[in-house]
Amino acid sequence: MGSEIPPSSAAGTDLAGEGPRPFKIFIGYDPREDAAFDVCRQSLLKRSSVPLEIHPIKQSELRAAGIFWRERGPTESTEFSFTRFLTPYLAGFQGWAMFVDCDFLYLADIKELISLIDDRYAIMCVHHEYAPKETTKMDGAVQTVYPRKNWSSMVLYNCGHPKNREALTPEAVSTQTGAFLHRFVWLEDAEIGEVPFVWNFLVGHNKVDPDDPATFPKAIHYTMGGPWFEKYKDCEFADLWLKELEDANKEKKLADV
């Protein structure tokens, strides 16, 4: 089982013989989806065989710190629609780090995904071919359709890559267009690595083939909305999420004792 390391103890290497450097994960946080964040975090920690350093990306805190000042637009369905692109900055532009939306449920050891990291790339993600038919998602939020839809929902960032350092500053993230950021326009196609779709398995879009283990989801993405919304309480894989919520609540109670 993975352990969560406080930021103050996570920046060093193995010089003191304390084990491997923890892998940094930034989860998009929205007050409307607090339970989703808890479940995503719990599912990562419970199954990880490597130490993790997990942080919520909270827009209110970034605004208070003067790191993010963009006005919210009508197409932003969550508070982390743009703050996600601050991941390399928040990681100090060092090493690799992952951003993930809060509406994910991890079913596999994140070490498996980390092992796919390739320093040739500036980022790595699932290359979805996805064009949703619905016009709304979650609790009535506007559903937008654009090239590379959902690619930015789970990204492994090579934080020190020169192009990321140049393009993903607080000023750029607060002023660049949504198209520039969500389509990764600052990168060449060859700089965007690919990981298997099972690490961003879109509920209602991707399908499981019972005869093909390569299609079994390792990270379920409730992109249209999950069981924490009344409208989606009976969606596909809702039972797995609800079981994880139960486990997360038990962990919270134990921590409070």
Image (cartoon, grey):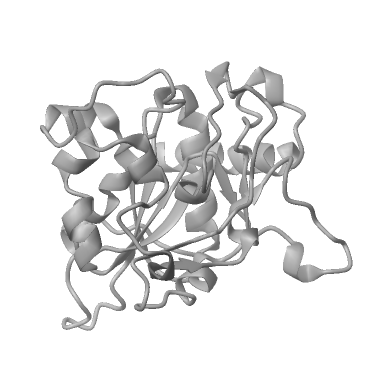
Instruction: Give left or right: position of 138 versus 187.
Output: right
Instruction: Give left or right: position of 162 versus 222.
Output: left
Q: State whether residue 61 is above or below residue 54.
A: above
Residue 61 or residue 136, whichever sits in front: 136
Q: Quadrant of residue 83?
A: top left
The C terminus is located in which quarter?
top left
In x, y percent, where is residue 168?
22, 50
Residue at x 50% of width, y 48% of height: 42
Residue 233 or residue 257, whichever sits in front: 233
* Residue 10 visible within the image: no
In x, y percent, where is residue 217?
69, 58
Residue 29 or residue 246, whichever sits in front: 29
* Residue 55 visible within the image: yes
Residue at x 23% of width, y 40% of height: 173
- For the image shown, how many numbered marks are present on the structure? 0
Q: State whether residue 97 is above or below residue 33.
A: below
In x, y percent, where is residue 77?
46, 25
In x, y percent, where is residue 206?
73, 50
Judged from this view, the residue extending furthest toward the left is 66
Instruction: Give left or right: position of 201 versus 12.
Output: right
Judged from this view, the residue extending furthest toward the right is 211
Residue at x 72% of width, y 44% of height: 205
